[in-house]
Amino acid sequence: MHPPLPSPPTLVIIPAYNEAAAIAQVVAQVRHSLPGADVCVIDDGSADETASIARAAGAITLRLPYNVGIGAAVQTGYIYAYRAGYDVAVRIDGDDQHPPAAIPALLAALAAGDDDMVIGSRFLAAPDVSGPDMSGPDVSGGDGVERCGTTGRGTTGSGYRGTLSRRIGIVLLSRVIGLLTGETVTDPTSGFLVANRRAIAFCAHEYPHDYPEPEARVLMHRGGLRVREVPVVMRERAGGVSSITTLRSVYYMSKVLLALALDALRMPRQPEA
């Protein structure tokens, strides 16, 4: 178990689109794992009851009038965190793929170093050794970084089972972003992360809308922010449908590579934290 952590004002940002089947469980698990934090669900124009279920579960709920996409929804959360004065932001998805029990390990990694953002990577994860416990006990990998276990539904490290096109795309993006930033990148599409006040301010002003996770890695490097990956184990979706199909993956890849090239040429502004 983790020792008690300092408690700077912390907001957990949960973007959600048609996640009525999972959102109450996600909010409950976040409140269990991080009882001192505020939880904010950004309903990205859902056609189902995502917003009302999130509100009933006790989350601050920001409802966008129509579907604007994951990048704009996440930036909405960062803008709220920035304007409300939070010192730390946690971002997880609303489909129950990101285990909230891993949040304390990410926060500990952020507090222990001089990084502005710590990202959970499924490709650095140790084998899944936990049982089906909602609190998800953590297991140390022997290197000072605690790996969070997950339920029996989970996938781990090299055992990640995505489609072939998605696996190829992740490898390609990792190598391209690594070349552009000089950093080691293993999970360029992970949206499971924690950010300090400096990163919150940056993302509130500069977070990309179209291909948010890969582009953010390049933009943050260009902006002088420090980003590190730590291992986590992620889970399968508890409900809803992924927005990325095989055909869309090919289209996505061609456009994101162009976007990354453009990002590498511009210098983002430096907002005050």
Image (tube, rainbow, N blue to C red):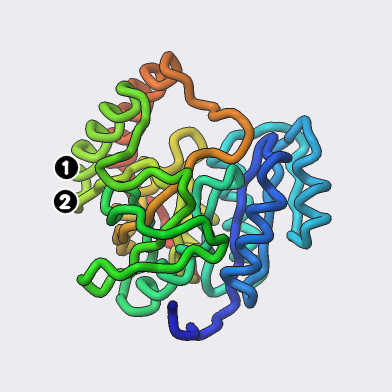
Depth order, front residue of 103/69: 103
Q: Which quarter shows the N terminus?
A: bottom left
**Amino acid at pointer 2:** Gly
Instruction: Answer left or right for 175 relative to 132.
Output: left
Query: Which label was assigned to residue 260?
Result: none
Depth order, front residue of 207/123: 123
Q: Which residue is mark 1?
A: 179
Q: For the view shown, which residue lies furthest in the front direction?
A: 131
Q: Which residue is mark 2?
A: 182
Residue at the image position 34 percent from the left and 48 percent from the top? 122
Residue 265 percent location from the top left of the image: 28, 40
Q: Is residue 218 visible?
A: no
Residue 151 percent location from the top left of the image: 48, 52
Instruction: Answer left or right for 11 relative to 178.
Output: right
Q: Is residue 54 visible?
A: yes
Crowd tier of the residue under label 1, counting other residues whose Cα lies within 10 Å: few below 14, some 14–19, many 20 or above:
few
Instruction: Answer left or right for 84 relative to 142.
Output: right
Q: Write down the quadrant of residue 49 in the picture.
A: top right
Instruction: Answer left or right for 203 relative to 75.
Output: left
Total numbered circles: 2
Residue at the image position 61 percent from the left and 63 percent from the top? 30
Q: Write down the quadrant of residue 79 in the picture.
A: bottom right
Q: Write down the quadrant of residue 18 in the picture.
A: top right
Residue 239 percent location from the top left of the image: 62, 36
Q: Is residue 17 above or below residue 132?
A: above
Question: Helix, strand or loop at disc 2?
Answer: loop
Residue 77 percent location from the top left of the image: 62, 55
Q: Are marks 2 and 1 in contact (CB under 8 Å)?
A: yes
Q: Is residue 163 above or below residue 267?
A: above
Residue at the image position 33 percent from the left and 62 percent from the top? 225
Q: Mark 2 to mark 1: distance in Å?
A: 5 Å
Question: Helix, strand or loop at disc 1?
Answer: helix
